[in-house]
Amino acid sequence: METQITIEEKDVGKRLDVFLAERDGSISRSAVQKVIKRNLVQLNGRPAKSPHEALRIGDLITFSDDALAASDAPFVLLPRPDISLEIVYEDDDLIVVNKPSGLLVHATVRNEQDTLANALLAHYPPIRDIGEGPERPGIMHRLDKDASGLMVVAKTDLAYQSLKKSFQTHDVEKEYAVLTVGNPPNEEGTIDLPIGRSTSERRMAARSQPLEGDRPAVTHYSVEEYLPGAALLAVHTETGRTHQIRTHLKAIGCPVAGDKLYGPSKSPLPVGRLFLHARRLAIRHPKDGRRLEFSVPLPQELETFLTVLRKRGETSERLTNRTASVSPDEDTG
């Protein structure tokens, strides 16, 4: 059954998700958000852009009662053995994987079933009961969907709690290879800017003047190589905020190459994907405390792009040297 609601003056200014959750009473706001983000709620004849849209008098909301009711059903993760899983290391307590670009780590409010979590469940079914949520079993940290690289996953409750403490005490070392559009202001530096939701609600923002709800975030970087119009950085993070590296580098004027959300609309570096790769991970084993360190090379597409940039730089340098070697009075033909 389809329901239509016209907004009256008493509800003007309310958020769409808040309004719908209050109206029903039996459905959580997070469930309402899921329905909205699946484009199942229309606002004035079009899919609502965001759960946070402010309502105006006369707005027409249209939705299916069945879709709204079904949204609050418990999430059930499905095993997906067809999703490739590159395991770097595994023992009885943990798994270290090399996540490819384009693979979501775990389901969002859209209840996706094509994630790293689905692949992990197919590989090791008992992992379903590990962790704090059915959509992210055993997963200790995240990488953005378009990023790639190393992640550690717990296989037991003991390992989960131990690794969780290691992350909280910053005893986990993570190093990222990042290519930026343009150069950072210094060869090495620290970005200490709180991060929170931007006012547009569609992305995160790093702010020197934090707003309520912003969380501390610290990122360290050093330049490994200067390239034409770009710099290759080694990046370490003290904290693990959503989009931390991407927002911090944008804040100092050198967004990550291939970043469609935080980078320039027309990037001068057409890398084809986000150039952010978690290349090194060091953890303490949850059972015996020994230090484990893992590293993986850049994916081939990123290495190939660097090769192209390096050749471009060599060509530019040769042309510059050739021009400099010709005296003003020489006939160059």
Image: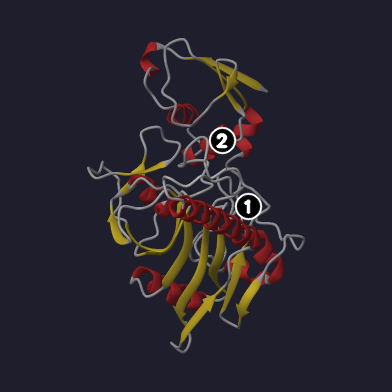
Pointer 2 or 1: first along the chain: 2
Distance of label 2 from label 1 (alpha carbons): 20 Å
Name the spot of residue 223 as percent of width and height, x first.
Answer: 39, 62
Please name whichever residue, 204 or 29, is drawn nearer the observer in this view of the structure. 204
Proximity of marks 2 and 1: CB atoms separated by less than 8 Å: no
Name the residue that disc number 1 marks: 102
Q: Residues within 10 Å of mark 1 (few under 14, many from 20)?
A: some
Total numbered labels placed on residues in the image: 2
Name the residue that disc number 2 marks: 37
Q: Is residue 284 above or below residue 111?
A: below
Task: Label 1, secondary structure: give it.
Answer: loop
Relative to 108, is 207 on the left or the right? Answer: left
Name the spot of residue 328 as percent of width and height, x first.
Answer: 41, 45
Q: Residue at x 63, y 52 (%)?
A: 102
Can you tell which of label 2 and label 1 is closer to the viewer? 1
Evaluate whether residue 29 shows in this view: yes
Q: Which of the 4 image quarters holds residue 168?
A: bottom left
Relative to 239, is 113 on the left or the right? Answer: right
Evaluate whether residue 135 shows in this view: no
Q: Residue at x 32, y 56 (%)?
A: 217
- The three-letter code of the residue at mark 2 reads Lys
Task: Label 2, secondary structure: give it.
Answer: helix
Coloration mode: secondary structure
User: In the rendered view of the protein, which quadrant contains the C terminus?
Assistant: top right
Q: Residue at x 58, y 57 (%)?
A: 311
Relative to 69, is 54 on the left or the right? Answer: left
Q: Is residue 24 above or below residue 222?
A: above
